[in-house]
Each structure stands twice: as C-alpha cells, then as structure tokens.
Amino acid sequence: MKNLKVLVIDDDSTTCSLLETILQMEDYETVSANDVGAGGIVPILNKEQPQFLILDFHLRSKETIDYVVAIRADETWKHLAILMTSAIDRRDDCLRAGANDFILKPFNWQQITSLVSSLSGGIMK
C-alpha cells in the first residue's frame, strides 16, 4: 500500500536506518524512534499516527510486551498492525501479547517487505 506510514522502534539506530531505507524503497513513509520513554508507547503513536508498527522485543534492557498489551487495550490503536523483531526467538510471547507477527533477526529485506505488505493488506485508509 503506497504511502502507508510505518513507525520503527528499535534501540539500535543502524537497524532503524536499515528498516527505514528498505521500506522507503518500497514507497512506504517511515519514522523511527530509538526508545519509548517513561510516557509509554501511546503518546508516540498519537504524535506519529502510523498505520503500521515494527517494534523490537528489547529496548535497552526492557521487554516491550507491555507496550503491545497497552496498544491492544487502547481504543484508538487496538487494530494497529504490529510486527515484532528480536535476535532471540520470542515469537510465541509476542503473538500471545497481541502482535500480528514476529520476525527473527537477522532478517533480509524481502522478508520485511513481504510481511509489511501482507499484514497491511487489510488496513483501510
């Protein structure tokens, strides 16, 4: 979907840059953040207004499962497509928390674009 806005949250700036470049090459609009901060994830979503979220499982030393639970509990964001990533296979935990899918690092660009495309297929603008 052209012009779909994807928010990438990962504490590794190289990963953020790589994901943004890959997605921009496929005509996605991107924005990234390296941390969520004390206010939680909903204020970032409200500010950036993404239609899709790529979220790393670990930000610094904190697991981000609680962020997914908060998103699913928020009336405005409960239908946001969420793809979680990690270098450790935490697929089951992420899916149980409410993520739409999970991808294990290191990933390749075809995997990312394929998942974003398939998960965003049902998003209505």
Image (cartoon, rainbow, N blue to C red):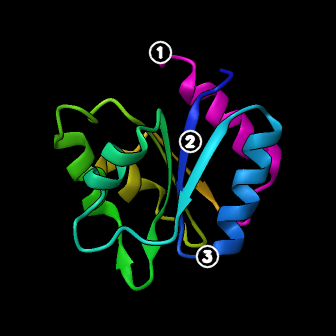
Q: Which mark is residue 6?
A: 2
In percent of width and height, residue 18 lies at: 76, 60
The label shown at residue 125 is 1
The residue type indicated by label 3 comes to Asp
Alpha carbon distance from label 1 to label 2: 13 Å
Mark 3 vs mark 2: which is more N-terminal? 2
**Towards the viewer: 9 or 89:** 9
Q: Residues within 10 Å of mark 3 (few under 14, many from 20)?
A: some
Q: Nearer the viewer, residue 91 or 15?
A: 15
Residue at the far bottom in the pictured view: 61
**Which labelled disc corresponds to residue 12?**
3
- Is the N terminus in the top left, top right, bottom left or bottom right quadrant? top right
Pick whichever of labels 3 and 1 is earlier in the sequence: 3
Q: How many marks?
A: 3
- Whether pointer 3 and pointer 2 mark residues with C-beta atoms closer than 8 Å, the reply is no
- Which residue shows up at 72% across the image and 63% down it? 17
Front-most of 49 and 98?
Answer: 49
User: Residue sitting at 79 percent across and 34 percent down?
Assistant: 26
Query: Which SS class for mark 2?
Result: strand
Q: Nearer the viewer, residue 77 or 32?
A: 32
Please tell me which residue is depicted at 61% across the width and 72% down the height of the picture.
Answer: 87
Instruction: Give the residues in magenta.
Output: 105-125
Residue 113 percent across, percent down from the top left:
73, 38
Residue 53 x %, y %: 48, 45
Q: Secondary structure at mark 1?
A: loop
Real-space Cα distance between discs 3 and 2? 17 Å
Q: Secondary structure at mark 3?
A: loop
In the image, residue 89 sits, relative to residue 91, either above or below, namely: below
